[in-house]
Image (cartoon, rainbow, N blue to C red):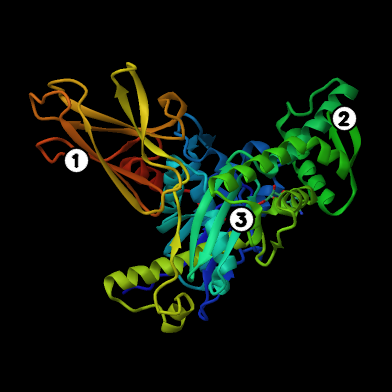
Amino acid sequence: MSERKAVGIDLGTTFSAIAHIDAYGKPQIIPNAESERITPSVILFDGQNAIVGTLAKQNSVAEPEKIVDFVKREMGKSRDQFHREFNGQSFTAEELSALIIRKLRSDAEKYLGVPVTDAVITVPAYFNDAERTATIQAGQLAGLNVLQIINEPTAAALAYGLDKLDQDQTVFVFDLGGGTFDVTIMRIENQSIRMVATNGDHRLGGKDWDDIIVNLVAEEFDRLHGENPLLDLQSYQDLQSRALAAKIQLSSRPRTTLVHSFNGKSIKIELTREDFEQLASPLVEKCKAITEIVLQEARMTWADIDKILMVGGMTRMPMIRELVEKASGGVEMTDQVSPDEAVAIGAAIQGILSMLGEEDKKGQRVIPMETREQFSTRDGGLIQVTNITSHTLGIVLWDENAMEEYVFPMIPKMTAMPCEVKNAFGTAQPNMKRAVVRIVEGESTVPSECTSLGTCSVELPPFLPKGSPVEICYQYNTNQVLNVIVDAFGKQAKATLERNAGLNEQELARATANLSLISVE
Ligand code: AMP
């Protein structure tokens, strides 16, 4: 068998990280070519060159038109909904993310001295089908075999729990990163890790705190000089990085000074931590509300929680620590795993578990026995990690009495994965030519309030009476990516989901060819 090397990748909104399991079976972060343990998720396009990381970030003010950042917030969008153009070439969010992964991969290969072939990539637990599919495709476009997509809080819990599997406990993972907020309750029991409940807001993160400072300075500037400094891209980027630095300073100091110049005019603002906390209180309240919802969903109170695992750079902020301390009534918070590194480390652990699982299926033994033992339970089986679905997956049906469409939940939120659900539905009219199945994701029974994932269409035999059964099967794999199969009455017709988002096979091949023309540093 040719050598395979798996890594774990935390593809973050602001920073990304990559980790592996070393020869001693220990998870380790792999530093990039600049010797940094995390790489800014920022791309600078320079002709046919894409520069990823700190150098790109440093140039974001000087050359804002050549920069792409916060790509993760655009994942799952079609090319029409989001793309960026450079050198006459258009890039989707998957393609841009692929460039970030290529940088991580090639730096890792240089550091490890072997080709990196396989990866587990993490996503916020709250990512939907389109966002997950886009993440898998980003990995594939970077030339990797994507072993699995796992939820960031699950990865963090794995990093934290690997050497604590002997102590049964309930862990609350509070993950506030640069662009997303995830809260998840995990149970470590019988040497396995099980997700109990999850919730979050994938549009709430560090950038929103930065924006508060950006807007504060811009408003003051406008009041003083009658000009909006945000209308100029360079000034906007400059202010954004100053705001981020000010936010970080306020985590360790009670006050900071911001200076901003634009069009020959300047402003100096003193900002205290107290004022910043006041301005950011609506964001903190949002975090608090989501925290309460996830406890309700798990049918738990803080008294049931043994540990709070703080993940994501934003959990260093005093206002966030205070929120968690107050809300939980002082449940122990743990920083045992670095908030910036835990997710990539957990992904690397999942990578080795996936490879060991594959070996078991094929009856092979390539991974050293000592490594296997590190990832095994007392009775010799592999550590089990069970995730649950974070959204309900439904089918749109016709309600004859109400004369309107409604959503029937096929796989309810919080179902353990992988799972498969079959249901038979009657045809709505006699002699229907086709059964068209509309698949949606969301918690509402009203179709327009859910996200449409796509459709499945199957030809029906002629002259079927009304109410003839059509069997629909939803298969949800461990990546939380859905496959839908329609078995039509009398004739074993099958069809798989045609997605609204993501690239089809042809587009994937074309994108791979286009991306290969770009060199990544
Ligand atoms: P992540 O996506 O987990 O890497 O989180 C990065 C976010 O954490 C960014 O918004 C950073 O500005 C923020 N961050 C990192 N360190 C600190 C700090 N000491 N205080 C406040 N925010 C921080």
Give percent across and percent down for residue 286: 68, 38
Query: Quick one: label 2 or label 1, which is nearer the N terminus?
Result: 2
Residue 104 visible in this rendered orientation of the protein: no
Q: Which residue is mark 2?
A: 264
Locate residue 111 relative to residue 409 in the image: left or right.
right
Q: Is residue 18 above or below residue 1?
A: above
Q: Nearer the viewer, residue 445 or 286?
A: 445
Residue type marked 2 = Gly
Q: CA distance from mark 2 to mark 1?
A: 67 Å
Residue where numbered disc 1 is placed: 494
The vertical placement of 80 against 290, above or below, is above
Mark 1 secondary-structure assignment: loop
Cβ of mark 1 under 8 A from ligand 1: no
Residue that appears at 66% across and 43% down = 205
Q: How many numbered marks does the figure carry? A: 3
Q: Which residue is mark 3?
A: 173
What's the residue type where badge 1 is placed? Lys
Element on which disc 3 rests: strand
Image: 117 above or below 483: below
Residue 408 location (% of width, % of height): 35, 32
Q: Which three-letter amino acid code belongs to the residue tagged 3?
A: Val
Q: Residues within 10 Å of mark 2 (few under 14, many from 20)?
A: few
Q: Are marks 3 and 2 in contact (CB under 8 Å)?
A: no
Residue at image point 65% right, 56% down: 303
Nearest-to-viewer mark from 3 and 2: 3
Please indicate whether residue 85 sits to the left or right of residue 275 in the image: left
Label located before the other in sequence (3 or 2)? 3
User: In the rendered structure, which disc, 1 or 3, sits on the residue that comes first in sequence?
Assistant: 3
Asked if the beta carbon under badge 3 is closer than 8 A to the nearest atom of ligand 1, the reply is no
Residue 186: give x, y in percent of width and height.
54, 58
Position of residue 343 relative to residue 383, above or below, is above
- Quadrant for the C terminus in the image: bottom right
